[in-house]
Every structure is written in structure tokens, then in C-alpha cells.
């Protein structure tokens, strides 16, 4: 059994989507980051970085419980646990998928997150922050648009790279991006959003922030 520690944010929803896609049984535990629950000692014992998501797999690869944090590592792990699902099997395609997963982890997530911080979390907006991260978000959409004009999915086939990126793009209004300006991203977004497992994963936990 997998215990998922999560909240209603893009990083958390990557993992709930993947669990739903793979049909892996899991128990969901909410960690309300708005109430600082990520700093509770019990959670810090699982993720010393005090961020959601985290999982504990009671049956790790060696049969012992395995706690894991960092959503990208969790997605790779769950792929392996489910026999390689959503990670292409040929080396070439696999590394392209991992490349786009890292692009999400190092670019899309942190930059969109900063854009949200400056555009939404602060009562008094700091124009420099809004402009810098708003511009960077749009630049990243341009990179996605170019790729998705050439390929149906970030890695040719639907993969953990798409699963990681979708919940962030789902917040396009938060980072003030109009998807009409990125038609290939919009096509990809609509295609992925129609997957039943994605719909289920995006509803975990069933609260909104
Ligand atoms: N690189 C981490 C980022 C995780 C992350 O930033 N999680 C946010 C929610 S999306 C969080 O837990 N924030 C709590 C805090 O800032 O204290 C991952 O992908 O797992």
C-alpha cells in the first residue's frame, strides 16, 4: 500500500494523477500547507524538505517501507513499480521523456510557482517579480508550444513528463497566460484533461486553493 501525503497543488496532483493512471492502491493524507502542517515532526520524518508531495510505499523494492519525496523522483518510482508504465521503453524515447520531466521540475514548476507567489500570494504586488516570472512563464509556454507543434505529447507518447506538466498548465489563469495564444499547448491540455485518471487525480484532495 502506498501512503500519499499531499495537498491541492500542482506538485501534489502530479502524484495523484500517476497513482490513478497506474491503478495503484493508495491512501491519501492531507498536509494543509496553508496551516503549516508540512512542518509537523511526523511529516518532516518523511520529507525533511517540508514540502508536499511525499509517499511511503510499505513495500519498497527490498520489501521494506520506502519514504520518497520530490515529485519527479516519485513519478519515476511509480513508473518502475508499475512495470515501466508512462515512461517509454526504448532508451532514446525514455531519455527524451526524462528531459521533459526535468524541464518541468527545474523550469515550469519553480517559475510558475514564483509567478503565482508574486501575482497572487502578495497583497501588495511587487512589479519586478510579477514581470520577471510572468515573462519567464510565457517563455516556457513558448518552448512547450514549439515542442507540442512537433509532437502529440512532450515525449512522443503520453508519459510522466505530461503528467508532471499538466497540473501546472491547469493553473494558466494564475500565471496570467491565455492559452488561445498557445494553440498546440491548448490541444495537448484538452487531450490530457479528458483522461478519466487525470480527472480523478486532479480532484485529490477534494478541496480548492
Ligand atoms: N521540488 C518539489 C517542490 C514541492 C513543493 O514546492 N511543494 C509545495 C506545494 S506545490 C509545498 O509543499 N510548499 C510548502 C512550503 O512552501 O512550505 C517537488 O516537486 O516535489
Image: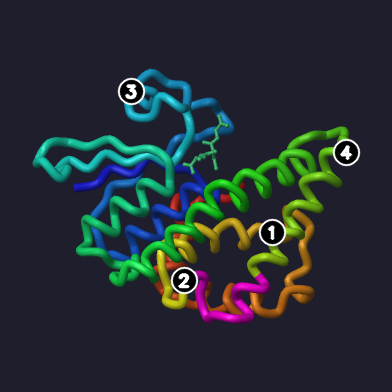
| 141 displayed left or right of 192 | right
**What range is drawn magenta here?**
145-154
Q: Nearer the viewer, mark 2 or mark 3?
A: 2
- In space, the residues marked 1 and 3 are separated at their CA atoms by 34 Å
Residue position marked by numbered label 3 in the rendering: 45
Residue position marked by numbered label 1 in the rendering: 140
Mark closer to the chain start, 1 or 2: 1
- In space, the residues marked 4 and 1 are separated at their CA atoms by 18 Å
| 120 displayed left or right of 81 | right
- Residue at the image position 67 percent from the left and 49 percent from the top: 112
Residue 58 drawn at (x, y percent): 17, 40
Q: Which mark is residue 128?
A: 4
Q: Are marks 2 and 4 in contact (CB under 8 Å)?
A: no
Q: Are marks 1 and 3 in contact (CB under 8 Å)?
A: no
- Residue at the image position 70 percent from the left and 41 percent from the top: 114
Residue 184 drawn at (x, y percent): 65, 79
Mark closer to the chain start, 4 or 3: 3
Near-viewer residue (27 or 19): 19
Mark closer to the chain start, 4 or 1: 4
Q: Which mark is residue 155?
A: 2
| 7 displayed left or right of 113 | left
Residue 39 drawn at (x, y percent): 47, 22
- In space, the residues marked 2 and 3 are separated at their CA atoms by 35 Å
- Residue at the image position 58 percent from the left and 50 percent from the top: 208
Neighbour tally class for label 2: few under 14, some 14-19, many 20 plus, Cα within 10 Å: many
Disc 3 element: loop
Which quadrant would residue 200 be assigned to in this image?
bottom left
Neighbour tally class for label 1: few under 14, some 14-19, many 20 plus, Cα within 10 Å: some
Amino acid at each position: 500500500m502506498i501512503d500519499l501525503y499531499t495537498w491541492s497543488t500542482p506538485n501534489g496532483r502530479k502524484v495523484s494523477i500517476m497513482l490513478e493512471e497506474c491503478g495503484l492502491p493508495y491512501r491519501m493524507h492531507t498536509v494543509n500547507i496553508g496551516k503549516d502542517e508540512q512542518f509537523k515532526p511526523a511529516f518532516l520524518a518523511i520529507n525533511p524538505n517540508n514540502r508536499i508531495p511525499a509517499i511511503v510505499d510499505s513495500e519498497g523494492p527490498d520489501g521494506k517501507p520506502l519514504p520518497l519525496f520530490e515529485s519527479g523522483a516519485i513519478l519515476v518510482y511509480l513508473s518502475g513499480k508499475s512495470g515501466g508504465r508512462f515512461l517509454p521503453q526504448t532508451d532514446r524515447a525514455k531519455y527524451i521523456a526524462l528531459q521533459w520531466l526535468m524541464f518541468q521540475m527545474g523550469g515550469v514548476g519553480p517559475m510558475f510557482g514564483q509567478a503565482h507567489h508574486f501575482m497572487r500570494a502578495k497583497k501588495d504586488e511587487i512589479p519586478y517579480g510579477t514581470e520577471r516570472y510572468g515573462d519567464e512563464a510565457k517563455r516556457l509556454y513558448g518552448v512547450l508550444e514549439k515542442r507540442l507543434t512537433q509532437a502529440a505529447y512532450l515525449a512522443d507518447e503520453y508519459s510522466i513528463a505530461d503528467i508532471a506538466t499538466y497540473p501546472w498548465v491547469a493553473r494558466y489563469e494564475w500565471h496570467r497566460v491565455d492559452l488561445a495564444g498557445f494553440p498546440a499547448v491548448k490541444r495537448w491540455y484538452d487531450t490530457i484533461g479528458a483522461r478519466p485518471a487525470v480527472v480523478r487525480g486532479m480532484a485529490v484532495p477534494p478541496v480548492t486553493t
